[in-house]
Amino acid sequence: MDTEPQSLRGTRTAAAVLALLAAAGVLAALYMVFFYAPTETSMGIVQRIFYVHVPSAWVAFMAFGIVALCSLGYLWLRDERLDAIAVSAAELGTVFTTIVLLTGPLWGRIAWGAWWVWEPRLTLTLLLWFIYVGYFMLRGAAESAERGKRFAAVLGIVGAVDIPLIHLSVQWFRSQHPKPVILRPEGPTADPEIVQTLLVSLLAFTLLFFALLLYRYGLERLRARVEAARLRAADARPAAPIEGAFR
Amino acid sequence: MRSHTSRRFRLLLAAAAALCISAPLAVPALAQESASAPASTPSTASTSTEAQPSTATPSTSAPALSNGLPTEPAPPRTLRAYWHVWIAFTLAWLLLFGYVVSVGRRFGKVERELEAMGG
């Protein structure tokens, strides 16, 4: 019984189901962002960027956390599936960090009067983006695929150290970046409608992330199948006679 | 054979992206409406102090009211802010849509390769 194509089919079905749920979540979140959440008093309309910026940051951090965990697992168990999840999560994390880095300056230009400020949280987030761009460069640059996976796994683990630094930087340093409004010891301080909208956006982005992760993971497994088929074909092929041998 | 799942997935994302891009267009009229009515409630005002950058005025209390009207000047509501919101949402969804298309293309390529190998 060929279990590999079956598991691939299962992955795709799960991705499709999650995509449907994510689509419903995104629609609900968009409705709440533009029709339910009140316009914030001091910043006005530009505060609505928050509903795409914060969930993207949350998903990016989760993605890089998954990269670190799966990389650790890969280095320990050498299971190719863990590497497939790690590379898929790293790609998605890079996409979502790009969204964070693009939407932040659009808010900052109106709120701060500057596109970019070299303050701790922004700088560390940019560093995180560069670390994961380096992750892919390292994978591609190694002389063997196996070495590339190992090096990238180490970078994936080291890079994740940046995540708590980003989160805590607003508390540790003098930072221009707004402090958290939800994850506070004394509870959320924002308006309930704003908190509800943010929570729905977070849920929608999380569902979207897992749908995309499964979709991308399916591609990685399919690639592994092609690679295995190629190796089988190379093994089955009779060796070409070497000219001049046994003469 | 191109997979139906990936095609359906891309179609779904395309519809979502179109919706996401068009949604912020509805904002200007809506924002005017909400700015004139409940935006000056104290709970919303307390949010403003949280979401403000630390360099902004560090007032932690609700804005002073005189005859039910805020005495502090209203925040600037320029057209530029609307543009920034629109660009932010459009960029985010276009990027995600582009990513899905890119994975779909890679999927197609690998599936063709597998087919050519008789897998």
Image (tube, coloured by chain):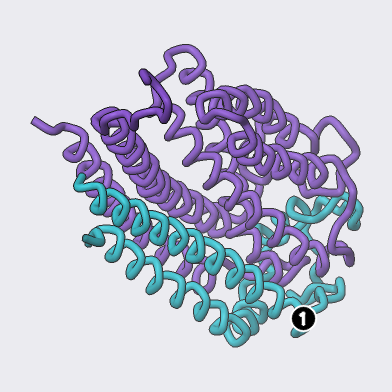
Chain colours: A purple, B cyan
Please state, as top left, top right, bottom left or bottom right, where the C terminus of chain A lies in the image: top left
Amino acid type of the residue tagged 1 in the rendering = Arg
The picture quadrant where one finds residue A153 is top right
Q: Mark 1, chain letter?
A: B
Q: How many marks?
A: 1
Q: Position of residue A39 (x, y in %)?
A: 64, 70
- In the image, B2 versus A49, the foreground residue is B2
Q: Position of residue A131 (x, y in %)?
A: 70, 37
- In the image, A220 versus B93, the foreground residue is A220
Q: Residue at x 40, y 28 (%)?
A: A242
Q: Is residue A168 left or right of residue B7?
A: right
Q: Is residue A2 left or right of residue B28?
A: left
| Image position of B34 with respect to A97: above or below | below
The picture quadrant where one finds residue A171 is top right
The picture quadrant where one finds residue A23 is bottom left
Residue that badge 1 annotates: B80
Residue at the far left in the pictured view: A1
Q: Residue at x 69, y 79 (%)?
A: B82
Please tell me whether mark 1 sits on a helix, a strand or a loop. helix
Residue at the far front in the pictured view: A247
Q: Residue at x 32, y 62 (%)?
A: B9
Q: Position of residue B110 (x, y in %)?
A: 35, 51
Q: Is residue A138 left or right of residue A244?
A: right
